[in-house]
Image: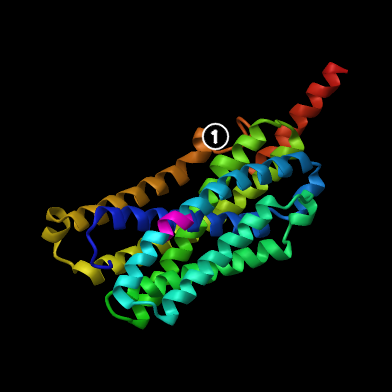
Amino acid sequence: MVGDSGIVSAVATWAFLVALGTLVGGLLWKHLFVRPADLGTGAREYCVAMYERFDRIASLAVIVTVLAGGVVFWRYVERFGTTVGVAALAMLVLTTVGIVAWTILADRTVESQFRSRAGLLALTFGLFTLLATAIGEVAMHGLEPAGIAVRMFHLLAFAVWIGGAVWNIFVAVPSGQERPRVDVVAAAAEQLERFRWAVRFVIPTIFLTGAYQAVDAIGLNVSVYVTSTIGLAILAKAGFIGVLVVIFKLCPMWRACSPIEGVCDLEELGASRVETDTDVSIDD
């Protein structure tokens, strides 16, 4: 997309976008999709465990964002020089990771972290950083309003997906599996439903905006897609999106996406609650 075929630059760019997307998407889930009402279910320990797990992941993402971002910014400096735009993007990144680092190190209760000013500020700066990154990438081959808008939607959708995937797979699910109680099932299932709702919009957005960028970059000639490295990469990414759709559809059937074994739908919580109550009465 930026006319740079260097492997180091490509890997650094991917690492930067994945790390930044994990931060932004994770903060989105932490402050918008994990809601204060979830604590009302009696799952406070579950929320504490999730926050601790996310902080460890965010710490790694902060390090990768800074290191990979250095390579990315060097590419921008080579292309544009030390302009105001490049300096502004650098300040956005540093401000974002700085606020996230502070929230990780600060010793606060889980209740005070819900929609905290620092957390929402980090999310806001993260979103602006994604949007500024989209502008910078498109500017590498000429500023085009349509291209900028498409790239913005693409990166935002990617952040929501990668952040939500990381949150559910590495935060919510393992935290829930350590606490197999009905109140935890309810809180975890609510988050999972929100993720499924978001994915219905996110994956089509990633695919459509990605397709636009692919056609804009290398056209519609099929031979280019099957004979060039960039074309094969685009086909591979399209294939991965197809795999994601299949996983999204089959996950409830596998019941592997649930923090509690065998429960993968909010409607099943009633039966799960009855079974748990029965077990308790038998034990008594």
Q: Is residue 264 visible?
A: no
Direction from residue 202 to residue 188 in the image, left or right? right
Classify mark 1: helix, strand or loop.
loop
Residue 198 visible in the displayed image:
yes
- Magenta span main SS: helix
Q: How many marks?
A: 1
The residue lying at 57 percent from left, 52 percent from top is 195
Find the magenta span and give its range.
65-69
Kind of residue sitting beneath label 1: Arg
The front one of 197 and 141 is 141
Task: Name which quarter of the figure residue 222 lies in.
Answer: bottom left
Percent from the top left, x then y, of residue 255?
Answer: 54, 34
81 on left or right of 258: left
The answer to whether residue 90 is magenta is no
Quadrant where the C terminus is found in the figure? top right
- Residue 66 is inside the magenta segment: yes
* Residue 213 rendering spot, x and y as whole percentages: 30, 68
Q: Is residue 227 left or right of residue 72?
A: left
Which residue is at 60% across, 31% downward?
A: 262
The outermost residue toward the front is 82
Where 100 falls versus 189 (above or below)? Answer: below
Q: Residues within 10 Å of mark 1 (few under 14, many from 20)?
A: some
Using the rendered view, name the quadrant where residue 41 is placed: top right
The residue lying furthest to the top in this view is 283
Reading the image, the residue beneath label 1 is: 255
Please state which of residues 28 and 263 is positioned toward the viewer in this rendering.
28
